[in-house]
Amino acid sequence: MDNTELKFMKAIESLESRLLNIRAGRANPTMLNGIMASYYGTPTPIQSLANITVPEARSLMIKPFDKSALKEIERAINEANIGITPVNNGEVITLTVPELTEEKRRDYVKQAKTTCEEARVALRNIRQDCNNEIKKMELPEDQEKSALDDIQELVNTYNRKIDEIFKNKEAELMRV
């Protein structure tokens, strides 16, 4: 049971980290997660190469520790195709997050819904694996049924958490 709940928690953590990458029209340094810039020939996360700040609600400022990395960071952001064009002034890179249209907001909500559904599928797969393990244990019928019911109750609890996470993300995305 403890092992199963740990797997469920990891599925929820994964969902939350994936939802962070769906932007809501505001600048957030996590938008740059996963973008790698070539630094002396080695792919390096931008967060390791520069200080990322949010001077205004809709802009990010990237100040590299080493100015020679400025062009590589700019190129990496362009290649990442995140929908924002970097502006390089020779010392810092500024990213201005465009205002989202109603249509784009709805697309992001659909994307969030799909991500949440993938998390539900992960929960069902974990439940299936756990149920198979319980059936292999050859427990007495009443203990087996009790264990299967406990697992189902855990799945229901985590499904409610996913619903709550989705509602919060949807409200964040649709807020103007």
Image: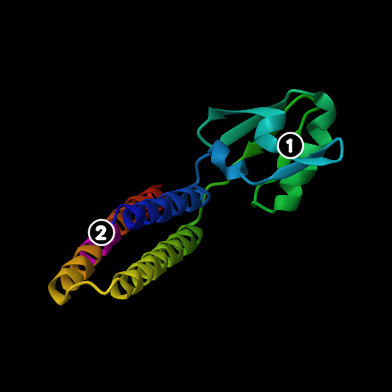
The segment highlighted magenta reads: 152-159
Q: Quadrant of residue 97?
A: top right
| Coordinates of residue 158 in the picture (x, y in percent) | 29, 58
State whether residue 108 is above or below residue 37: below
The answer to whether mark 2 and mark 1 are in CB contact below 8 A is no
In depth, the one of 170 and 124 nearer the eye is: 124
Mark 1 highlights which residue? Answer: 87
| Gap between marks 2 and 1 measured at Cα | 42 Å
Say whether residue 157 is left or right of residue 28. Answer: left
**Mark 1: few/some/many CA within 10 Å (<14, 14-19, 20+):** few
Say whether residue 50 is left or right of residue 169. Answer: right
Residue reaching furthest left? Answer: 142
Say whether residue 156 is left or right of residue 19. Answer: left
| Coordinates of residue 175 in the picture (x, y in percent) | 38, 48
- Whichever of labels 2 and 1 marks the residue nearer the N terminus, that label is 1
| 20 drawn magenta | no
**Chief secondary structure of the magenta portion:** helix
Q: Amino acid at mark 2?
A: Arg
Task: Identify the image quadrant of the N terminus.
Answer: bottom left
What residue lies at 33% left-to-right and 50% top-to-bottom?
168
In depth, the one of 48 and 7 nearer the eye is: 7
State whether residue 176 is above or below residue 160: above
Q: Amino acid at mark 1?
A: Val
Mark 2 highlights which residue? Answer: 160
**Mark 2: few/some/many CA within 10 Å (<14, 14-19, 20+):** few
| Coordinates of residue 5 in the picture (x, y in percent) | 32, 54
Circle count: 2
State whether residue 94 is above or below residue 122: above
What residue lies at 86% left-to-right and 35% top-to-bottom?
40
| Coordinates of residue 32 in the picture (x, y in percent) | 62, 42
